[in-house]
Image (spheres, rainbow, N blue to C red):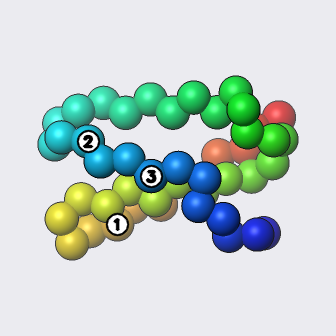
């Protein structure tokens, strides 16, 4: 794992977020979502 930040966004509360990962290389990615003082992490695999 390289630990590089590929993208950073700020969105309004209650807004759906769609990430276009078509330009990403095949691999495993972790998405961190910060809401207030809480952070949730999601892992996805691009094949």
Specify which label sits upstream in the sequence, 1 or 3.
3
* Residue 3 position in % (x across, y down): 68, 70
Q: Residue at x 67, y 53 (%)?
A: 29
Q: Which mark is residue 8?
A: 3
In the picture, measured across the screen, residue 47 lies left or right of residue 14, that is right
Question: Which quadrant is the C terminus positioned in?
Answer: top right
* Residue 35 position in % (x across, y down): 24, 59
Q: Residue at x 64, y 33 (%)?
A: 21
Q: Nearer the viewer, residue 42 or 12?
A: 12
* Residue 16 position in % (x across, y down): 30, 30
Location of mark 1 (residue): 39
Q: Real-space Cα distance between discs 1 and 2?
A: 15 Å
Location of mark 2 (residue): 11
Q: Residue at x 38, y 56 (%)?
A: 33
Q: Quadrant of residue 14?
A: top left
Q: Label 2: state its secondary structure.
A: loop
Q: Give the class, few, some or many, for how many residues have Cα within 10 Å of label 1's Cα (few <14, many ≥20).
A: few
Q: Real-space Cα distance between discs 1 and 3?
A: 14 Å
Number of marks drawn: 3
Q: Nearer the viewer, residue 42 or 3?
A: 3
């Amino acid at each position: 794992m390289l630990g590089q930040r590929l993208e950073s966004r700020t969105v309004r509360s209650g807004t759906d977020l769609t990430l276009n990962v078509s330009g990403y290389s095949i691999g495993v990615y972790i998405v961190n979502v910060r809401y207030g003082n809480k952070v949730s992490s999601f892992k996805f695999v691009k094949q």
